[in-house]
Image: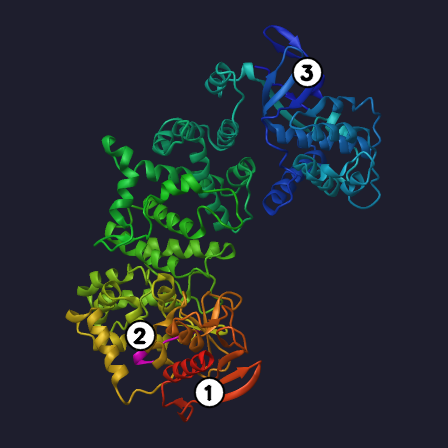
């Protein structure tokens, strides 16, 4: 093997012996298959790696302690063109360092002519940039060199969008920042050979012969995954040859078998492996509080590289994260369905099953979902969102520690995790992930829930308090465990059951019976008959709706302004209901008794209960401009968060619907002066807090006061409004 140490200059000047003959490399060409130059990317993770790498190169020059940058290997054509298969990043950095040194120390161009033989085939812009750079003599006096390069006439605007060129510019500035005070760089690089590497032609490699023979036989270039795999194995080998061999074996056999059931249409599992690799690596990134890295090669160096402090622990964590699923069963015949069986054993789809935790989705295999959907995009609309990351991490933590956690402990603890995840939608965000992962791990390993008095950054504090209370309550009421879990899994609650009074044990079951067996509109009316259970959301208020489940779920779990009042009213209704008679008929009797009771006051609730059109809006959302002084001036919204959509004065809308005639009309967009118009005439009617006003040609002509006592109606204003409208229509028809 030609394992002689070479400098970047040597590779063009020291012949190689191949097949008993000498060949001189006349050109290095980065192939199209290679990814863009990434060591110059400008983000937190890469900045750290770049500074560390350049500092190591500087130390090699300053201290005369030579540094060897491991193996660089590739294919050499008969005419002496080297196509690197591994080492592109290092070669590009060395090219830029030699260029910087030559220019800074005014080296004779003949001495660095070999730089003209390094080029990129990835795109013309990168190739042309390298050519122009060699001819350019920068000003080192002040400012960033990159900005001066961008100001050159030969630097077109579109190069600002070439990722390789932009990375090169960042690297040039970094080299200048670290090396600018150092002298005699050229002598150290060329004569003292401070920075070297081993170069191996592909024909002399034995590490990955099978891989490359296979690729050559099919006449196709190596895929990105195959490049990654080769580099990953080499990185692990820097720590331990045995560990590298073990992981290589698992990659080719055990882990391939593990992922094969999830293969794509082409029977390849490369993308499945990479997605799960990203998931596990991102967990480590988040636990360390490091910046995300999208490039798999740099991510590998960042977490598993030779100089990384926790590299061995990280490698073992990665290995165990694959192995824990591979070893989920020892039975060969069950291997193919083992993961699916695991999820079916501990989780249910959309309904409660004893001994399982409901996930509210059809396909329970979260591992498969990760392999299919985990993406490198860390912005919006993740296909595999943060809540799924936390859930899968929690399951992985159990599988890593099955010898320390009993099956029953896992069932209880993963239920707590599910509850925390579903009820921390505002808290589950990227900046909190480090704490969220730590809290999840603590729950799974020890069954404890951490609550901090200081600025809470983890899961929702109220939900954590609820989970602690459940643990204590179940110790006192062990016979209620199934009923409690049944309630937790209800689709309206999803783990948060604060809406139910636990001290009234029967209310747990009554809640389920009520919302599973009765019409939501009847429940809404029954609750209103007891009191104002609405909750305030900014400038608007919300009650239940006829069919949108999320409205009720928000009322019962969001704990907004008015939540405790909702709790009191819901539990009053539950306590008053007979468990054996929870049905629509019972609720209708309850509502009828309320409406027929002469003591019932005609406040806004009375009208909402009596007239169905007042509950027409999709989201149960209403707006009072002045609720205290003008409680009957109410806008019914047909949207969730805006008055820009359809909305109506709730009393005019009800009158319009009850009249059911084309002789009147009402706008879909309420405003301060909204009126119901009578036919094609010039007559309109407005509904105010204590009166109806009749307009003719936009001038007030009549007022009909509504009888009130202490600001509360003592006559039905809808009935009165209907009489007024009928009378107006009748007069118009005369």
Q: Which residues are magenta?
A: 526-536
Which residue is at the far top? Answer: 20
- Examine the structure image and report whether residue 527 is included in the region drawn in magenta: yes
Q: Secondary structure at mark 1?
A: strand
Q: Where residue 25 is drawn, which disc sits there?
A: 3
- Examine the structure image and report whether residue 604 is included in the region drawn in magenta: no
Q: Secondary structure at mark 2?
A: helix
Where residue 487 appears, as percent x and y from the top left, is: 26, 63
Where residue 561 appears, as percent x and y from the top left, is: 43, 75
**Marked residue nearer the N-terminal end (3 or 2):** 3
The Cα–Cα distance between marks 2 and 1, rounded to whole angstroms, is: 26 Å
Is the Cβ of the residue at disc 3 closer than 8 Å to that at disc 1? no
The Cα–Cα distance between marks 3 and 1, rounded to whole angstroms, is: 96 Å
Where residue 279 appears, as percent x and y from the top left, is: 45, 43
**Marked residue nearer the N-terminal end (3 or 1):** 3
Q: Which residue is mark 1?
A: 691
Residue in the image at 48% along x and 69% along y: 647
Give the quarter of the figure containing the N terminus.
top right
Residue 631 in view (yes/no)? yes
Q: Which residue is mark 2?
A: 525
């Amino acid at each position: 093997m030609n394992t002689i140490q070479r400098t970047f200059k040597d590779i063009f000047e020291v012949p190689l012996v191949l097949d008993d003959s000498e060949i001189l490399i006349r050109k290095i060409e980065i192939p199209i298959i290679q990814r863009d130059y990434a060591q110059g990317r400008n983000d937190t993770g890469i900045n750290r790696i770049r500074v560390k790498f350049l500092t190591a190169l500087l130390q090699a020059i300053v201290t005369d302690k030579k540094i060897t940058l491991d193996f660089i290997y590739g294919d050499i054509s008969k005419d002496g063109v080297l196509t690197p298969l591994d080492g592109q990043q290092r070669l590009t950095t060395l090219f830029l360092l030699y260029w910087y040194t030559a220019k800074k120390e005014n080296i004779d161009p003949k001495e660095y002519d070999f730089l003209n033989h390094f080029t990129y085939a990835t795109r013309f812009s990168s190739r042309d940039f390298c050519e122009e750079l060699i001819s350019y003599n920068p000003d080192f006096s002040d400012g960033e060199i990159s900005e001066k390069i961008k100001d050159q006439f030969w630097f077109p605007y579109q190069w600002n969008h070439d990722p390789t060129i932009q990375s090169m510019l960042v690297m040039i500035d970094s080299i200048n920042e670290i090396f600018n005070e150092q002298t005699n760089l050229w002598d150290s690089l060329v004569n003292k050979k401070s920075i070297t590497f081993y170069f191996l032609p592909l024909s002399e490699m034995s590490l990955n012969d099978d891989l490359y023979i296979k690729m050559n036989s099919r006449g196709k270039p190596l895929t990105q995954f195959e490049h990654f795999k080769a580099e990953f194995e080499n990185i692990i080998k820097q720590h331990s040859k045995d560990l590298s061999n073990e992981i290589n074996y698992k990659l080719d056999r055990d882990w391939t078998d593990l992922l094969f059931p999830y293969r794509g249409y082409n029977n390849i599992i490369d993308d499945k492996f990479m997605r799960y690799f990203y998931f596990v690596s991102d967990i480590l990134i988040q636990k360390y509080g490091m910046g995300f890295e999208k490039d798999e090669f740099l991510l590998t160096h960042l977490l598993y590289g030779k100089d990384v402090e926790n590299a061995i622990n990280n490698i073992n964590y990665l290995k165990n994260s694959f192995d824990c699923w591979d070893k989920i069963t020892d039975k060969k015949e069950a291997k193919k369905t083992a993961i699916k069986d695991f999820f079916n054993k501990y989780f249910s789809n959309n309904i409660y099953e004893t001994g399982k935790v409901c996930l509210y989705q059809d396909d329970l295999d979260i591992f498969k979902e990760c392999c299919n959907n985990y993406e490198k995009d860390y912005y919006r609309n993740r296909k595999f969102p943060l809540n799924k990351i936390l859930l899968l991490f929690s399951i992985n933590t159990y599988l890593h520690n099955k010898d320390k956690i009993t099956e029953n402990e896992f069932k209880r603890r993963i239920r707590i995790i599910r509850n925390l995840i579903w009820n921390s939608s505002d808290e589950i965000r990227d900046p909190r992930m480090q704490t969220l992962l730590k809290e999840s791990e603590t729950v799974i390993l020890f069954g404890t829930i951490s609550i901090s008095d200081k600025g809470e950054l983890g899961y929702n504090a109220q939900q954590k308090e609820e989970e602690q209370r459940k643990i204590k309550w179940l110790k006192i009421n062990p016979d209620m465990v199934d009923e409690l879990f049944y309630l937790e899994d209800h689709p309206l609650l999803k783990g948060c059951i604060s809406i139910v009074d636990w001290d009234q044990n029967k209310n747990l079951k009554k809640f389920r019976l009520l919302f599973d067996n009765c019409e939501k509109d009847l429940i809404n009316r029954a609750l209103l008959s007891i009191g104002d259970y609405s909750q305030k959301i900014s400038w608007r208020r919300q009650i239940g709706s006829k069919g949108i489940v999320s409205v009720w779920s928000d009322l019962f779990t969001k704990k907004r302004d008015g939540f405790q009042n909702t709790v009191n009213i819901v539990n009053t209704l539950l306590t008053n209901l007979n468990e054996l008679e929870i049905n629509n008929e019972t609720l209708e009797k309850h509502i009828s008794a309320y409406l027929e009771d002469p003591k019932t006051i005609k406040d806004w609730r009375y009208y909402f209960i009596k007239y169905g059109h007042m509950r027409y809006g999709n989201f149960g959302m209403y707006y009072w401009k002045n609720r205290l002084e003008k409680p009957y001036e109410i806008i019914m919204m047909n949207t969730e968060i805006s008055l820009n959509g359809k909305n109506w004065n709730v009393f005019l809308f009800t009158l319009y619907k009850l009249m059911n005639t084309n002789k009147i009309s009402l706008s879909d967009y309420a405003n301060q002066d909204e009126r119901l118009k009578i036919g094609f005439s010039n007559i309109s009617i407005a509904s105010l807090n204590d009166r109806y006003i009749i307009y003719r040609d936009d001038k007030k002509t009549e007022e009909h006061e509504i009888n009130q006592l202490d600001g509360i109606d003592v006559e039905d204003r809808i009935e009165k409004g209907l009489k007024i409208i009928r009378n107006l229509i009748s007069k118009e028809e005369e």
